[in-house]
Image (spheres, rainbow, N blue to C red):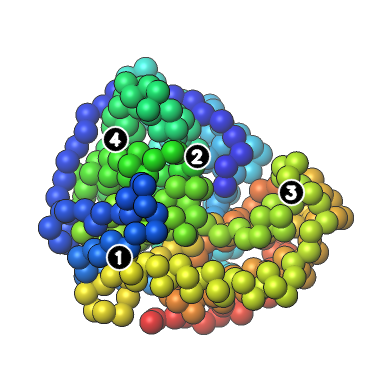
Amino acid sequence: MLFYKPIIALSAIFLLASCNSGSGALNRAVDDDDDKKVVTHPAVDYSKGRAMNQRLGHGINLGNSWESAGTGAHPDCGWGNCIQDEDFQIIKDAGFNSVRIPVRWEQDVDVNGVIDPIRLAGVKEDIAIAHSKGLAVIVNFHHHMNMNYAAVNAEKDSANYKEELAKFSSMWTQVATALNEFPDSLLVFEIMNEPHDIKKKAFVNEIMLAGYNAIRAVTLTKTIMFEANGYSKFGAIKQLDLPQDGNIIASGHYYEPYEFTHQGTADMYKCGAEITSSNLSQIAKDFKSYVDSAKVYFPDIDGKHSVPLNMGEFGAIGRTGSFCNSKAPSEAMRAQWTSYVIRAAESYGISWHYWAYGKTSGFQAYNQDDGEWFPEMKKVFDSFTSNPFPTL
């Protein structure tokens, strides 16, 4: 999710790497001037990525923490939602398989482009605790606004765009190097969260490839996750140029319909919207279209699957902490929407990470003030996490 603003980064060099599965060539996306043109891509053996996606399974986001604009000794506390060691056990006990940790690496980068060592050490500590509980982890670049802004204005200021692309690559080199000590089976690198408002697909693809190449220069064996433009809309995945690498995952976010899930978060989303039977029936149709599209554009050599898909964020605002207060969706309504979305995703083997665990302006599933899960949400999660993630 995207609500806040940027900081800076500095200097780097582009790193090129071959991938660990396939030729290293790209599966080219749809042309910018013809979004309806179907491009036939070489099939790839995505079995490694699919195995990691299965391992991620049922997950949840630790949002509004490391991606906050925090500084000093506890940079994950910038928005009042510090991650506590015991959170990982609570999440594990609820049956989740993994956590997604959004990180604002751009915050407090020094003049030489070196990432804040306190932030890096804190993230490493949280990854280690998660792993000690048997939880796999996704770590991303979240709220990387300088890169996104430069891409939005790339045609007007190509020099700044190239400079930010080099910085982005350098920062990924630092992160991948520092975190490569963790097991491949328990850590996924997500290149950049929610690219948005970027006019040409080519710029999004250059950002993704820069991150991918920086990571692959450090490790040939970690799973890498890609996201498309439009705040990581599933429908935009076909616009990506994916490397012919079998150890990757494509991630999308799902918050449809926005007037329900995001009511009160902007003037256009007024309070009081309710979920309808039509909205609920549309969810299954949406996910079928996403999967059908992925199979067309990025097929697996087995003739059955596509590039593995992850739902990195989805959620609906509730009454606790929401600007809408009593006009926000009831817990029963929020839980119903969540159940429909998870059921649709799991029917296609799409791993998922609910937004979010703790205090996130009404999206939270766990009530930190009372020390317990919201009951209706807990029922939904239990109905899925009590069973192994489906193998398709």
**Sequence-first tag of 3 and 2:** 2
User: SS at mark 3?
Assistant: loop
Residue shown at the point (48%, 74%) measured from the top left = 288
Give the amino acid type for the residue marked by disc 1 in the picture.
Answer: Phe
CB atoms at circles 1 and 3 under 8 Å apart?
no
Q: Look at the numbered discs 2 and 4 and tell me whether their residues touch, using CB distance below 8 Å.
A: no
* Residue 197 image label: 2
Q: CA distance from mark 1 to mark 3?
A: 35 Å
Q: CA distance from mark 2 to mark 4?
A: 21 Å
**Mark 3 or 4, which is nearer the eye?**
3
Q: Mark 4 — residue? A: 169
Is disc 1 placed on a helix, strand or loop?
loop
Amino acid type, mark 2: Asp
The residue pinned by badge 1 equals 298
How many neighbours does mark 4 have within 10 angstroms: few (below 14), some (14-19), or many (20 or more)?
Answer: many
Q: Which mark lies nearer to you, 1 or 4?
A: 1
Residue drawn 24% across the image and 63% down it:
41
Is 204 displayed left or right of 4 in the figure? left
Disc 3/disc 2 C-alpha distance (Å): 19 Å
Labelled pair 3, 2 in contact (Cβ < 8 Å): no
